[in-house]
C-alpha cells in the first residue's frame, strides 16, 4: 500500500491573502451589524415621533372642534334670544292695538310674530 503524499503546504503568500480576506469579512460584518442597529434605532425614533405627532394633531383637532361647537351654541343662543325679544316686542305692540279684545287680536299677533319666518 502506498501512502498518499501529504497535501502540499500552501504558499506563505496565500495564507496572508486568506487572513486579509477574513479580516475584511469581519470588518464588513461589523459595519453591517452597526448599520442595522442604527437603522433599527432610527426607525424606532421615527415611529415614536410620528405617533406623538398624530396625538398632537388629534388633540388640536379636538380643541378646534370644541371651540367651533361652542361658537355655534353661542350663535344659536344669541339668535334665539333675538327671536324671543322680537316676538315679545311684536306681541306687546299687537296687544296695545286699537282697543280690540285679545282674542280678536290673535291673528294680528300671530302675523307679526311669524312674519320673520315667511319664505323669501
Image (cartoon, rainbow, N blue to C red):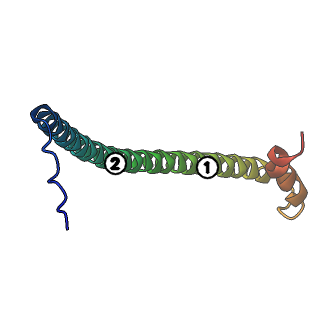
Residue 108 location in percent, x, y? 88, 52
Q: What residue is disc 1 on? A: 76
Taking depth in this image into account, of 106 and 69 the one nearest to the observer is: 69
Q: Mark 1, residues whose alpha carbon is within 10 Å: few (<14), some, or many (≥20)?
A: few
Residue 64 % position (x, y): 47, 44
Res 81 visible: yes
> Residue 79: where, in percent of width, then height?
64, 46
- In this picture, residue 101 sits left or right of residue 64: right
Taking the spot 37% from the left edge, 50% from the top edge, the residue there is 51
Mark 1: secondary structure: helix
The residue carrying pointer 2 sits among few (fewer than 14), some (14 to 19) or many (20 or more) residues within 10 Å by Cα, namely few
Comparing labels 2 and 1, the label whose residue is closer to the camera: 2
Q: Quadrant of residue 49?
A: top left
Please name whichever residue, 86 or 27, is drawn nearer the observer in this view of the structure.
Answer: 27
**Badge 2 element:** helix
Residue 97 visible in the picture: no
Q: Which residue is located at x 83 percent, y 54 percent? A: 109
Residue marked by disc 2: 52
Whether 72 is drawn above or below 4: the answer is above
How far apart are the alpha carbons under marks 2 and 1? Answer: 36 Å
For the residues bearing labels 2 and 1, Cβ distance under 8 angstroms: no
Residue 107 appears at what percent x and percent y? 90, 57
Amino acid at each position: 500500500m502506498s501512502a498518499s503524499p501529504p497535501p502540499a503546504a500552501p504558499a506563505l503568500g496565500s495564507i496572508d491573502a486568506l487572513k486579509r480576506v477574513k479580516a475584511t469579512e469581519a470588518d464588513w460584518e461589523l459595519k453591517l451589524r452597526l448599520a442595522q442597529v442604527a437603522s433599527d434605532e432610527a426607525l424606532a425614533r421615527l415611529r415614536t415621533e410620528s405617533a406623538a405627532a398624530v396625538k398632537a394633531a388629534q388633540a388640536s383637532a379636538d380643541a378646534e372642534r370644541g371651540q367651533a361647537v361652542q361658537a355655534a351654541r353661542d350663535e344659536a343662543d344669541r339668535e334665539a334670544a333675538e327671536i324671543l325679544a322680537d316676538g315679545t316686542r311684536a306681541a306687546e305692540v299687537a296687544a296695545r292695538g286699537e282697543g280690540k279684545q285679545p282674542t280678536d287680536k290673535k291673528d294680528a299677533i300671530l302675523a307679526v310674530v311669524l312674519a320673520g319666518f315667511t319664505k323669501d
